[in-house]
Image (cartoon, grey):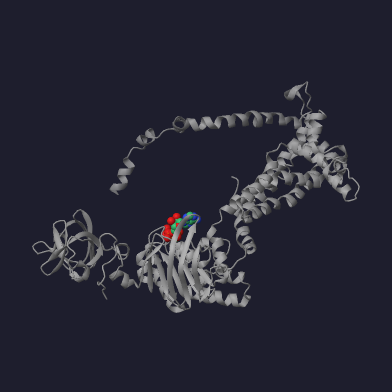
Amino acid sequence: MAELDRTAEAEPATYTINQPTRMERIIDHLKADWQIYLLLAPTVIWMLLFLYKPMYGLQIAFKDYSVFRGIAASPWVGFEHFETLFTNDQFIRAIRNTVTISALGLFFGFPVPILLALMFNEVLSQTYKKVTQTIVYLPHFISSVIIAGIVITAFSPSAGIVNSLLNWLGLDSIYFLTRPEWFRPIFIGTGIWQEAGFSSIVYLAAISGVSPTLYESAVVDGASRWQMMWKITLPSILPTIIIMLIIRIGNILEVSFEMIILLYQPATYETADVVNTFIYRQGLQGGQYDLAAAAGLFNAVVAFILVMSANSISKRFSRTSLW
Amino acid sequence: MPGVRLRNIVKRYGAAQVVHGIDLDVAEKEFVVLVGPSGCGKSTTLRMIAGLEEISDGLLEIDDRQVNRVAPKDRDVAMVFQNYALYPHLNVAENIAFGLRIRKEPKEKIAAAVEEVAGILGLTEYLERKPADLSGGQRQRVAMGRAIVRDPKVFLFDEPLSNLDAKLRTQMRAEIKRLHRRLGVTSVYVTHDQVEAMTLADRIVVMSDGRIEQIGTPMDLFLNPANTFVASFIGSPPMNQISAIIRSGDSGPVAEFGGQSLPLAPLKDLVGADGRHVILGLRPEFVDVTHKGEDAQVSVDIDLVETLGSEALVHASLNGDPFVIKTETGTDVTLLDKINGFNIDPAKIKVFDGETGVVLPGQELK
Ligand SMILES: Nc1ncnc2c1ncn2[C@@H]1O[C@H](COP(=O)(O)OP(=O)(O)OP(=O)(O)O)[C@@H](O)[C@H]1O
Ligand SMILES: [Mg+2]
């Protein structure tokens, strides 16, 4: 009892006076670590200027926007632009194309870096490994414009190497880049060529994290290289594969849009026009900024939902997540 | 001879030679322990037997068959690794079955074998668990299970217990010993822990710097170390070594050091060897302590007394060098603080050559 009484008597006031306020603590913290915040500042400023300030303009998706009236003075029109969009066949087509191209890209493109990494892992000669890795990483460092130039040249009907080969085999030239049915294979193939090598780095890193004694133990147990790949390497990097897959699904609407702009033409819009290129044409070329803003907002909201759900699925199943 | 035979086994990495010609015969069912300080080539030797390292030179036979160029899987050996090498994505049963699955044994046979091995190792309740959900000792047991289930000609162990805490290590040590009695498989076991070597081995191979220093039974190495290296490696605490000069006394050779002296056994090499530099080896267990007021052949300064229960370790210094004595605690603990020196039976002093460190002949203890 005496013990209890004493604690009750103790003045709580002295306690709180010594406690720094929240603001004081923040200031102390800033004083102590100001260098780190200084390093952070450029990124924060950049994000505010180029990612957050433009969000103010998003409201034109709900306005009858005119450049002359300005954003604030343009009258509200509610969901009119969205109604227009969803009754527009071109927009519907763009959504369909986006999803199709993304899904096909995922299906054909996703396994390639994994296969590459597994193959690199089996290469014994260090020199050969380095040379091949450099070769497959290279396209990643080349500008998309140049990549597109290479692709257009390679598939050109007159001088392109592909058609020369077809001719040499006795086949007729194909006007690849004007044919809707060829756009997607070429686009997805280009994407794989450009990025698969570089993406394989993630898997190579995962593979190098597998303990070498697992392989030694398997060797003594009598496993062949093939068995080790299937029974050790692949299961060991499976968590990485799952995470990468979830991230890819979350980004499914993010078709690499500059590459499409570089490769498509009106003749291939039918299979090539995606939401982002649609926005680009409506907004920047057609001057319908409000309609383009609505389409962009739609794209962003869907992407946001996808990323959020992918992340929570990942959290649940692989105990790993982006945040 | 069935078992394992190494003849002049050499390992080179590029120009650097790390194993300099090992000769060793491991008899069938024998448990041989390779022991030595870090970097002396124990693992390299073991891995050459397993086939994980190429043999640079020499001859390796398993069961009377030369296996230098035989792939690991065809050598019929099983290896237990220090970090267990369990497959994290497989459960205990699948881990144990891995070697048999790889060899495409029939399913029923695998299941029966896994069940039997799990029974032997007390893993039956854990068969469904993943390695991450096991304790260190259980993981170690799974690693052993993976080796046992293959029913190989030879077991190879590379420091299998060094990731376990002291208590568990003692327990697993006993378990390995029991297992070896039960299965009777030829085993080569690598450790740098001499206690492990002493307790497990039928014969110990002491290595240093890529060479064999001595091969013998644990007691043989303890009583008759071939040189100062083995003397300083085997036993805990290890043998005390005193640098001394030989003088002829009235009743045989005498060793002098720092103004003190000890009579020695009349070894042939010491007769008329006045002025010869030798190293005396005194086991901490073999000296009889004296207390204040008693006569001592050698007097020492006591630094610290560690009481371990029934025994005590007396850390003393002799001519400025550390000297350790192991003695019974007895009933009167205060006696420990009154130690002033020791006596020793001349037959229990090992005399090593002062330059080469090799033991002088004629001193074998039984
Ligand atoms: N790939 C290699 N290239 C060059 N030298 C090596 C290589 N692998 C091991 N060595 C050397 O060979 C020697 C023996 O190594 P080993 O692993 O057999 O030692 P160890 O006796 O098992 O030691 P520890 O008790 O620390 O495990 C060491 O000096 C080591 O530096
Ligand atoms: Mg080792």
Q: Quadrant of the C terminus of chain B?
A: bottom left
Q: Residue furthest top?
A: A68
Does residue B124 show up? yes
**Quarter of the figure with residue A256:** top right
Q: Position of residue B232 (x, y in %)?
A: 30, 62
Q: Residue A292 vs residue B186: left or right?
A: right
At 36% across and 35% down in the image, what residue appears? A13
**B308 to the left or right of A254:** left
Where is residue B142 shown, x and y percent of the image? 50, 68
Foreground residue, A60 or A7? Answer: A60
Left/right placement of residue B119 relative to residue A63 reads left
Residue A266: horizontal and vertical position, in percent?
A: 87, 37
Identify whether A112 is placed above or below A64: below
* Residue B308 visible in the snapshot: no
Furthest-front residue in view? B272
Indicate the quadrant where residue A267 lies.
Answer: top right
**What is the x, y in percent for residue A101?**
78, 46
Q: Quadrant of ligand 1?
A: bottom left
Residue at 47% across, 63% down: B10
The residue lying toward the viewer, choosing from A254 and B169, is B169
Total of numbered circles in the picture? 0
Front position in the image: B353 or A175 = B353
